[in-house]
Image (cartoon, rainbow, N blue to C red):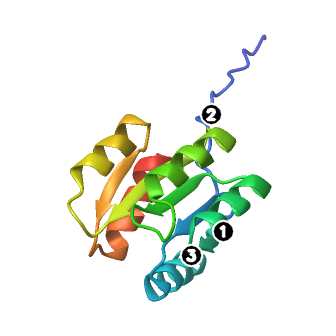
Amino acid sequence: MRRDIVRKIKKPAKRDKRSITILIVEDDRDLRESLGAVLREEGYHVAVAQDADEAIAFAREHEVQIVFMDIFLPGMNGVEVYKIIKKMRPAATTVMMTGFFVNDLVNEAISAGAFDVIYKPFTIDDIFNMIRKITG
């Protein structure tokens, strides 16, 4: 008697949290550090940057999958930083963060390819929901 072999097609596995590097670019120290700590506790690999120079230097040296980028940073605005990082890491998904209604910068970021904008104050659930939207 002949048996047919049935192969199951597997869906691509969701990425393991430990394989996802998240870069948080935020000049507010308390927000940057607390968000980083919560995401690390959740199992993500997290890096933090307080300004454009730190963010660009990190992205130049490391693979990044998700970037949470403050729109207002000292020296260079977050949209400009986003465009630089996008050239180095085109596969990275960036979410802009702002506490202000700055339609011109938000529109510029979205037009340049930013994934979304999250408005401050946000909750950690908002961040987790955004990560789920990005990672599927």
Q: Pick the residue in front: 109 or 24.
A: 109
- Residue 49 position in % (x across, y down): 60, 72
Task: Find out whether the residues at labels 3 and 2 contact each other: C-beta distance under 8 Å.
Answer: no
Q: Is residue 50 above or below residue 53?
A: below
Q: Amino acid at mark 2?
A: Lys
Percent position of residue 87, x then y: 63, 39
Image quadrant in which you'd find residue 120: bottom left
> Farthest residue toward the front?
75
Quadrant for the N terminus, please. top right
Label 1 SS: helix
**Residue 46: quarter of image:** bottom right
Q: Viewer-proximal residue, 56 or 23? A: 56
**In the displayed image of the protein, which residue is found farthest to the bottom?**
30
Between the C-alphas of marks 1 and 3, the distance is 7 Å
At label 1, the amino acid type is: Glu
Which residue occupies 58% across, 64% down? 52
Question: What numbered label is drawn on residue 50?
Answer: 3
**Pointer 1 with pointer 3, Cβ within 8 A:** yes
Residue picked out by circle 2: 10
Q: Secondary structure at mark 3?
A: loop
Q: Residue at x 60, y 77 (%)?
A: 40
